[in-house]
Amino acid sequence: MLEVKNIKYSYNKDYQALKGVSLKVEKGEMVALLGKNGAGKSTLFLHLNGIYEPDEGQVFIDGEELKYDKKSLLKFRQKVGIVFQNPDDQIFAPTVEEDVAFGPLNLKLPMEEVQKRVKESLARVGMSGFEKKAPHHLSGGQKKRVAIAGILAMKPEIMVLDEPTAGLDPQGVRGLSKLLKELNEEGITIIISTHEVDLVPNYAKRVFVLVDGLLIAEGTPKEIFAQPEILDKANLEVPIVTELFQDLEKEGFDMNNDYPLTIDEAKEKFLELLNKN
Ligand SMILES: Nc1ncnc2c1ncn2[C@@H]1O[C@H](COP(=O)(O)OP(=O)(O)OP(=O)(O)O)[C@@H](O)[C@H]1O
Ligand SMILES: [Mg+2]
């Protein structure tokens, strides 16, 4: 379980990026953090394994307060793996395989286990065959995949991903969403920030909305996407499927205050509407 209690953080004296953020994520959950550019999503994420130390407030992992000495940080970073928004902040080894191996080697795992994890992690993100490549010769989307493989190889209990689908091609976005869902089913707690509202209802059971360093809403995708004033404050839109049904309602179809968010829900609703007519 991960808990953030009233975190405040300023980059400099006159600019507070987090103004008192509290949230709880239970073990095994998969949640999304939404918010416009500059809302503070990355700043919040960098607190979740102690890369940033808050000015005020605390972070708890499995009920234990995060401390900032070297030994504690090592322990917490084994539990919480963060995939940075910009892969260039994460990847630094001369080859892809060395980069992915860096975390497991640091955990002092036997070489055989390290190699196994590198192979598996690269396969899961669709980057097998790139082992010997220099990361700086990879495309943006490929770098992102390698960065994700590097965290996967650590087998963290909690994975925090800062806009992991940004820069991926459409099949890459779908593939990654599927992978994250699988990892979650395998028991990994997943926290993800994203602007891809179409996909959020497919995987997130709960959504947090951050605006100007404050959480303004928390709820199921159904609850969040039904609140236009919240969406407006956060520069968000409803999923495109939902927009279609809102338009149909304007044409006189009775939606009964229930708007589909996913393709599956849309299909059901269509059949229901057809049967009524
Ligand atoms: N290193 C820094 N020094 C000073 N200010 C910063 C720094 N990093 C971020 N900020 C400021 O803090 C605020 C929050 O930034 P943050 O990167 O957390 O936003 P975000 O929600 O992740 O945005 P995006 O969707 O663009 O990734 C912004 O106003 C930003 O300009
Ligand atoms: Mg960010």
Image: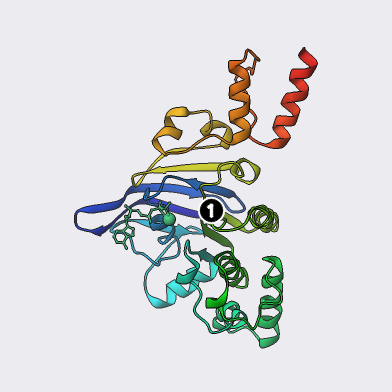
Position in image of residue 165 (x %, y %): 57, 56
- The image quarter containing residue 144 is bottom right
Position in image of residue 215 (x %, y %): 40, 42
Per the image, label 1 sits on a secondary structure element best described as strand
259, 76: nearer the viewer: 259
Q: Quadrant of the C terminus?
A: top right
Question: Is 147 located above or below residue 60 in the figure?
Answer: below
Position in image of residue 3 (x %, y %): 46, 53
232, 202: nearer the viewer: 232
Q: Is mark 1 within 8 Å of ligand 2?
A: no
Number of numbered markers: 1
Residue type beneath disc 1:
Ile
**Residue at 59% across / 22% down in the picture?**
247
205, 134: nearer the viewer: 134
Q: Residues within 10 Å of mark 1 (few under 14, many from 20)?
A: many
Position in image of residue 72 (x %, y %): 43, 72
Q: Residue furthest left?
A: 13
Judge left or right: residue 2 versus residue 169: left
- The image quarter containing residue 245 is top right
The residue at which mark 1 appears reads as 192
Q: Residue furthest right?
A: 275
58, 229: nearer the viewer: 229
Question: Is 238 located above or below residue 151 in the figure?
Answer: above
Judge left or right: residue 52 versus residue 12: right
Question: Is 273 located above or below residue 71 in the figure?
Answer: above
**Residue at 67% across / 36% down in the picture?**
262
Tell me which image quadrant ligand 2 sits in.
bottom left
Name the colour scheme. rainbow
**Residue at 74% across / 18% down in the picture?**
273
